[in-house]
Amino acid sequence: METEVVEISADVLNSPALKKRVELRRLSMDEFIERHASGTLRKNKRIGFAVQNHYLHERVAYEFGWGFEILHRSRVTFGDAFSEGDCSAVTESGWHAERYLTMSIFPEDYFELKFLHIEKSEHEKQAGIGLVVRQTSAPWVPKGHLVYALIAESIPRKGEQPEHYLPAQNPF
């Protein structure tokens, strides 16, 4: 599954309270880089670097929150996130996810809490509880990509022992 891009609703487009957020969401890559990107990204674009991945990394963090990332859909798989008692990372994951979902201002943005398996590279893999952006009105999300946030990273244990989690991180 990839993050599906949909149109912004007329209610949101015409909302005076959301005017600045709508304008931000609709900026082109060049406009975003000029107005909001890091100095490194602006300079590297100016001198001729290929900046698409760097841009997406910064844009996702800027608009969705510092804990969000974007990868090609083939590098992120997910299933059900299971609740368990007496595990602070799982409890806090739920709290962070609920707060994020409650604070989300774009009605077109649809999130799901999942257990993620992420393969950033052949040698860099992560797993844990996180949010997956299944649908968004952010037109700059490329087709075939998935936006997600890993909230509580799982540290696998050998044998039959249950998952162990690092402390949960607020993705906002």
Image (cartoon, grey):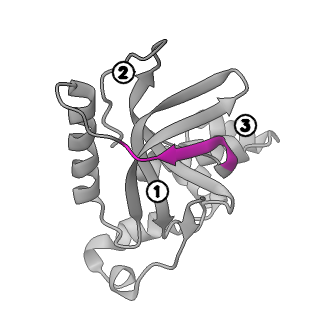
Spatial CA span between label 2 and label 1: 27 Å
The residue wearing badge 1 is: 133
x and y percentages locating residue 3 in the rendered image: 56, 61
Residue 79 in the magenta stretch? The answer is yes
Q: Say whether residue 101 is visible.
A: yes
Which region shows up in magenta?
74-81
Q: Say whether residue 42 is visible.
A: no
Q: Amino acid at mark 2?
A: Pro
Quadrant for the N terminus in the image: bottom right
Q: Earlier in the sequence, mark 2 or mark 1?
A: 1
x and y percentages locating residue 76 in the rendered image: 60, 43
Q: Is residue 95 left or right of residue 28?
A: left
x and y percentages locating residue 52 in the rendered image: 71, 48
| Res. 44 mark | 3
Q: Mark 3, mark 1: which one is toward the viewer?
A: 1
Q: Secondary structure at mark 3?
A: helix
Spatial CA span between label 2 and label 3: 45 Å
- Quadrant in the rendering for residue 161: top left
Residue 153 in the magenta stretch? The answer is no
Residue at 45% in and 78% down: 8
Q: Amino acid at mark 3?
A: Asn
Query: Against 48, is 33 above or below?
Result: below
Q: Nearer the viewer, residue 71 or 42?
A: 71
| Res. 162 mark | 2
Query: Against 130, is 8 above or below?
Result: below
